[in-house]
Image (cartoon, helix red, strand yellow):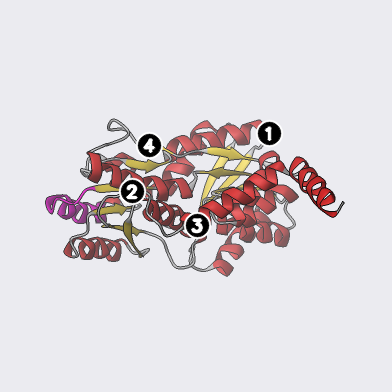
Amino acid sequence: MGAVLVAVLGASLVGCSSTGGKRAEDARKAEQARGKAAVSTPEWTFAMITHSGDGDTFWDIVQNGAKEAARKDNINFLYSHHDEAQQQAQLVDAAVDKKVDGIIVTLAKPDAMKAAVARARKAGIPVVTVNSGSEESKRFGALTHIGQDETIAGEAVGDELNERGRKKALCVLHEQGNVGHEQRCDGARKTFKGDMKNLYVEGTNMPDVQSAIEAKLQSDQDIDAVLTLGAPFADTAVKAKEGANSKAEIDTFDLNEKVAGGLKSGKLGFAVDQQPYLQGYEAVDLLWLYRYNADVLGGGKPVLTGPQIITKDQASELEEYAKRGTR
């Protein structure tokens, strides 16, 4: 009788939670495979050098994707970053001196990076650009660019603001000199039927960011939308809105766990997701494909990972992935 009950109970559990059982099995298999390469190619070394500042969670997600692909592809993955362009260029030079087998680099401030990328190419090191620099990537000799077209992403924001009936918007730029940020605001302004102004802030100082947004909202109660260009700044903008007693909708570029929660609660209107995990993963994977088989994607055009407009309707589904650091 005991054996029969166990069998019946087991069958019922499988029937009631087949999806959960499959997820558990998938997770178990993934854990078993973790750390084991899925290919037989040599252990090549790829270096990723970005323009990230300290503590930017966006780049944690990029790294998670890159590291996952590196494990699969038997890659020794090196990561470094600096938000000062000249320092970033020196990090690229250092990777060239190490004679790495591939370089992944961002071109947020392309003029400062041009010589370093040229040095890598002269040394015979394949380069993939990621996230920023889609317009300069091919000209600089990179194999391809992986990310979103910032102008197209901005235009999508303008369209979404129109759909929501917004009339006066504030675009908050947290890194002066970043061409991608300028392109986002310019693109939004191009399609937005209302009035949009730029607000430049020092992104490394969150209290000052909050004060600047709050002061702008207090001085102009007609502002009905605030657009931030990075997930960490969305929550700061919400606090500024509350401090100014403003009714403006807060919208943002990029997605993380806190942004997903803000979308669910209604504190945020929408987010523009460029899928940073995919950017990191594909950058490593494409370099591996080039080293292994001389494969190149894009046909001279960027490989787009966005934009995708995320609203409250999709937030619950994506929150699970955001919590694990992949969205």
The residue carrying mark 4 is 303
Q: CA distance from mark 1 to mark 3?
A: 50 Å
Q: CA distance from mark 3 to mark 2?
A: 16 Å
Residue interval drawn in magenta: 111-126
Instruction: Decide: is 136 above or below 123.
Output: above
Q: Main secondary structure of the magenta part?
A: helix
Tell me the quarter of the picture where residue 312 sits: top right
- Secondary structure at badge 2 equals loop
**Which three-letter amino acid code belongs to the residue tagged 3?**
Gln
Mark 2 neighbour class, 10 Å CA radius: few under 14, some 14 to 19, many 20 or more: few
The residue carrying mark 2 is 39
Labelled disc at residue 32: 3
Pointers 1 and 3 in contact (C-beta within 8 Å): no
Labelled disc at residue 154: none
- For marks 4 and 3, the one nearer the N-term is 3
Between marks 4 and 2 in the image, the one whose residue lies nearer the viewer? 2
Instruction: Decide: is 313 above or below 173.
Output: above
**Which three-letter amino acid code belongs to the residue tagged 4?**
Val
The residue carrying mark 1 is 165
Furthest-front residue in this view: 1
**Which three-letter amino acid code belongs to the residue tagged 2?**
Val
Between marks 4 and 1 in the image, the one whose residue lies nearer the viewer? 4
Horizontal and vertical percent position of residue 42? 25, 54
- For marks 4 and 1, the one nearer the N-term is 1
- For marks 1 and 2, the one nearer the N-term is 2
- Secondary structure at badge 4 equals strand
Horizontal and vertical percent position of residue 110? 29, 50
